[in-house]
Amino acid sequence: MNPFLFTNIGSLVRAHPSGGQGDLGVIADAAMAVERGRIAWVGTSRAVPHEYETWDRVDLQQKMVVPGLIDCHTHLAFGGWRADEFEQRLLGVSYQEIARAGGGILSTVRATRGASADELLARAERVLCEMSTLGVTTVECKSGYGLDLESEIKTLKVYASLAQRSPLTLVPTFLGAHTVPLEYRERREEYLSLVVDRMLPEVVERNLARFCDVFVEGVAFTREEGRRVLTAAQKLGLRAKIHADQMSDGGGALLASELGAVSADHLEYISPEGRDAMARAGVVAVALPFATLYTRGIPLRARELVAAGVRVAVATDFNPGTAPSFHLPFAINLACTLYGLTPSEAVKGATYYAACALGMQDEIGSLEPGKSADFAIIDAPDVNHWVYYLRANSCIATFKNGKKIYSTEPFDGVSDS
Ligand SMILES: [Zn+2]
């Protein structure tokens, strides 16, 4: 693609690293130069350097530009759905009761084991395509619905194939310790050995994951078990993530801090000690409001995390049980309406801090010279209005590495990917 100068940008949301959770570094009446897939320059329209004056121009007619959204926590590929459990939960059956009766994650495990790699890939690819229309350009994706060597590898290989085919960046995470599968219910020690001694080395050997995640919760794994899996993963070069303190205070936030995990996710039941430990250790908190909404659980006390100096990312947790939506802009809205973040804080959570939750903040997540030209054009005057006015879709174009991968308008002269 030729170098381009985007002009007449109403609000350019840099989501820069400096400042706190709510500091987006917005530039009003801005311009942005893009060359060879990277951002060359950003600033006000009046300050465009002479060297960019001759570049092809795209007039954005006062639209807003934001960094490409980053969904830093999804369970992208799975078989089946769980709409029947949705009804049961509404009738008063708890998530834990459903899980103990062999439903919940285990029913998705059955469906995922039964699905072919091609089926998983086709469905996940459609989801990625729809995500891109919402302004999403990077997606973390977990295994954890296979729970045997073959099916975990199958899922992670689907992600590797998708990474080749999709214009989006996929970031794979191994979640073999999502729950104990049914056949190991009375032999959980053996299952942990399978994860640590067989699955992890094979995943690393085949270079199929960047992170290892564990569900530390009463219905899944204890803190000690989580420590065992994540310590083994770290020795093999994977970075740690934890599903932590979602339905009870299981010490997940403390474990994440102790191990130097890159993120701890959920955290509705985080203790004050866990919160302070995360702030000290620099662990990113990933807020997952769809899960709160669908389980009708207590909301994350996001304001307390921000006040304690914890960086809060926002993601969808897209999965067939507790978060059957990949609509990240809606999750940003819920991070405000359910959790009390401001729109600016929530947007930083789905851009720069989401990049931090993936250890990719030097490459993506903010609009700064040298970074990937991943951005979305939003039909809104500013961040507050975008997040507050909950339209079906405010995104009118998505660019990945400087290439247009979705748009509702021609943007004459800008080549497609
Ligand atoms: Zn999750």
Image (spheres, rainbow, N blue to C red):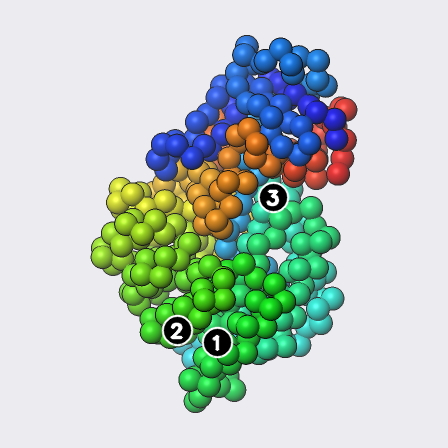
* Outermost residue, bottom side: 186
- The image shows residue 88 at horizontal and vertical percentages of 47, 70
- The image shows residue 15 at horizontal and vertical percentages of 46, 33
Q: What numbered label is drawn on residue 228?
A: 2
- The image shows residue 168 at horizontal and vertical percentages of 65, 47
Name the image quarter holding residue 121.
Answer: bottom right
Residue under label 3, please give it.
Answer: 137
Q: In the rendered view, would you say 211 is above or below 180? A: above
Residue under label 1, please give it.
Answer: 196
- In the rendered image, the quadrant that contains the C terminus is top right
Q: Amino acid at mark 3?
A: Thr
Q: Amino acid at mark 2?
A: Arg
Name the image quarter holding residue 219.
Answer: bottom left
In screen coordinates, is 320 left or right of 334? right
Residue at figure coordinates x 74%, y 66% from the top left:
118
Distance between the Cα atoms at labels 3 and 2?
33 Å
- N-terminal-most mark, 3 or 2: 3
- Assess mark 1: CB under 8 A from ligand 1? no
Helix, strand or loop under label 3: strand
2 and 1 marks in contact (CB < 8 Å): yes
Distance between the Cα atoms at labels 2 and 1?
8 Å
1 and 3 marks in contact (CB < 8 Å): no
